[in-house]
Amino acid sequence: MAVSKVTFRIQRFDPAVDREPHDQDFEIELPPGITILKALNKIRAEKDPTLALRYSCGSAICGSCAVRVNGHARLACKTQVSDCTTNGVLRVGPIGNLEVLRDLVVDMEPFLASLDRVKPYLVAGNGAAPEYERKQSPDEFLKIDPSTTCILCAACYSDCNVLAVDDDFVGPASLAKAHRFIFDSRDVDTADRMRAISEKTGVWDCTHCGECSTRCPTETKPLERIEEIRTKAMTDGFHGNPGARHALGFRETVGKRGLLDENYLPARSMGFLNLPGLLSLVPIGLRMVMRGKNPPLIPHSIDKVDEVKKTFARFEELRK
Amino acid sequence: MYSHDIVIVGSGLAGLRAAMELVGQLDVAVVTKVYPSRSHSGAAQGGVAAALGNVDDDSVEAHIYDTVKGSDFLGDQDAIEILCSDAPRTIYEMEHLGCPFSRTDDHKINQRAFGGHSYLRACFSADRTGHALLHTLVEQTYKQGGRLRVYSEWHMNRLIIQDGVCRGVVVMDIKTGKLEVLRAKAVLFASGGYGQAFKITSNAAANTGDGIVAAYRAGVPLQDMEFVQFHPTGLYEHGILLTEGARGEGGYLINADGDRFMSRYAPSKMELGPRDIVSRSEQTEINEGRGAGPNKDYVLLDLRHLGKQKIMERLPQVYNLAKDFIGVDCTEDPVPIQPTAHYSMGGIPADNDCQVYLDENGEHVEGFFVAGECSCTSVHGANRLGTNSLLEALVFGRRAGKKMLDAEPGLARAAVDEERELAAARDEIEVLYAGDGSEDLNAIRDELKETMTYQLGVYRCAEDMQQAQHTIKGLRERFRKVQVKNRGKQFNLNLLETLELSNMLEYSELIVDGGLAREESRGAHFRSDFSTRDDVNWLRHTLAFRTDDGGHELRYKPVTITRFQPEERKY
């Protein structure tokens, strides 16, 4: 079998000697069909026994070996070297949004602690447990099937663009965990869960960039779960928060004029009676005015606004 | 030195289930060399057994008989009775805690067929049953908040037993390299199996038998170590598990000619014969030239006739593993497979309340308990039935917890000479740095794994095992010259894998010697030179005791037979 030469450009960091992480190249000969994990272990065996990484099951179920390959989070054990090599080079680094402890090993604690914020266990009600299993239909099971496949590898957490700028965001894996109970027909805490998750740092703080679902190695796909929670929030009337008001305001202005009213929307999101909230918008408003970026003060409609209104009306009918 | 009432080593189903029984009442700590959610229980796929009778008229009685027969009559029948009788309660309890289970049309827990079980008995969550159960217990640890102390990424180096009393463990924080003594009134090992000694294995890298070897070095015998289960459907060359549920859902095993060869070996059960028989049948096909592929060294798992919808709904993980690891789309092509080392029937001997035995006469080690795969109770005997391992971990994890809670008032936190214990652990590490470096860790490990897979595999014989004995003796000599080259403190994998290899070499010798001594074929231990079961001489458990010179002595104890006398095992 043909052997190919690949350069692994690995981000190294030894807290005992390094102040900053740095890259180190390892040129290694690999047989075809080899995974990144096997290649990293080969590098440890043949080139450098000090390289630190995490791994265990080797079959994509334990979630230990998430690393960044060419800048994106992946499970090393199920990723083929050949799929990631460009001009014979492949970059490996630790996953993001978590502090690096050594080489490819990061501090998992903030990630694991984030789960604690969504009450990550079934709340079954006060009655005595039934003698047999509780009933659940196959369809009800299928609703939570995707979110229960999460292996807590933190690939989504690593590549989340909101977490990169906001440490307080609860994060995609925790929202998927919340989904797993919100949509579990056996859980009785749905309203409290929905209320809590609708607050700041919760489900509305996601900017739906989609990185989490793209990086997720399982069927969890956090973004899809986040969208299901948001839909439920709108349906169940959890509207008393900026996220929901933003979505409602979005629909109102587009439904009315065929385009966004960017003066109305921020105030609508913040709440018209929320004086401190409204005042907090003033600095950014002023900066926009100074740079000539402010939207026109008198809102206008698009030409074929009737078409838009018809579409909205049709949606309303369908929804009912 | 840290003190707790109870220290549990291992965070899989057995360890976490035991912890649940104790938390809030006693000061409990769980030590794990990974994180709890990464324990190997999570890799179990196809199901967990319980005679719920949700889809047919199964009974606990039938479950007991199937398990006894599956064990090739080496299982202790009193323990098996406990296991099967407690199964329905266990499943309902996990359901009540929130475990997601696949459902029937009348909204009950669904059940599928599994090898060696005569009814549809495997409760499942698609093909991720272990994952679903493990994460349910991990969720419960969150519910406990700070009341449960979890030492994640700590390696257990030594078990402290002195004057017949267990006093704690010596552990190493992998993040800092620091050694600590954890002192306790009672210690529970729920530290998993020893399948890493094999080249083709479904086991995680962590399954290096750390618990069993620590116990053995502390003076506890190990039982039935020669019994290692080979799972019939390991992904070719990788050894990665493809669930038996694939056959439970109707998948075929075929050879190069497309022939469903199980018709010649287990005509009534076909692909759903017990694992030992199916694995041997596959190996026979390969040995007799009917294997598939350019080297005729694998057989095929054919799921095509199940249809894409059923595969994606019931066997999504199988689909993904075949696709990601060897690029086969199992909805369109059969999947290359071979037997893979899977489950350790042997382990630390214990009674039905998980209290560890010190010898063949029923003497116990005070304050030392075991549960799950590292234990040998023995509910699996010579061959475990699929879906009985998750069950065992839950049933006996709970029993261990209950027993420790009962026993705790009578247990003192015995004195520990901290300096001496730390020094002993430090010495064990220092000696690994002091080797002359003329031998390579990886070369020795590779040779051990090759030896175990090819000479202690599905078929065994005296000649192969004698050769293996000789090889491993040599490897142990060579191991003294290995040198840990990484002197760093944080995440020193080089040191960890050297400690692990030392464990693997130590217990592999027991697999070989136990197998060589046992001149019969029973369950997973099949000898081509003694191809029948010999109940007159070998209806007994092996116990391996460590001797002062680092060698060992084999002794034996009887099997507990209550209701089912040994009979010929046919499927």
Image: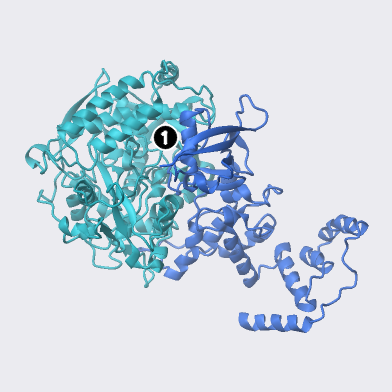
Chain colours: A blue, B cyan
Question: Is B9 in front, or is B70?
Answer: B70
Q: Is residue A293 left or right of residue A5?
A: right
Name above or below for residue B554 compared with residue A206: above
Name above or below for residue A4 compared with residue B335: above
* Residue B539 occupies quadrant: top left
The percent coordinates of residue B453 (x first, y second) are 28, 38
Decide: few, some or many residues near mark 1? Use Cα within 10 Å; few <14, some 14-19, many ≥20.
Answer: many
Q: Amino acid at mark 1?
A: Val
Question: Is B185 in front, or is B159?
Answer: B159
Quarter of the rendering occupied by the C terminus of chain A: bottom right
The percent coordinates of residue A77 (x first, y second) are 47, 45
Task: Name the outermost residue toward the left.
Answer: B536
Question: Is B439 in front, or is B134?
Answer: B439
Q: Is residue A121 visible?
A: yes
* Residue B332 occupies quadrant: bottom left
At 26% from the left and 68% from the top, the residue drawn is: B56
Task: Name the outermost residue toward the right.
Answer: A290
The percent coordinates of residue B404 (x first, y second) are 35, 39
Numbered disc 1: secondary structure: strand
Question: Is B495 in front, or is B419?
Answer: B495
The percent coordinates of residue B208 (x first, y second) are 36, 35
Report the residue marked by disc 1. Answer: B7
* Residue B516 occupies quadrant: top left
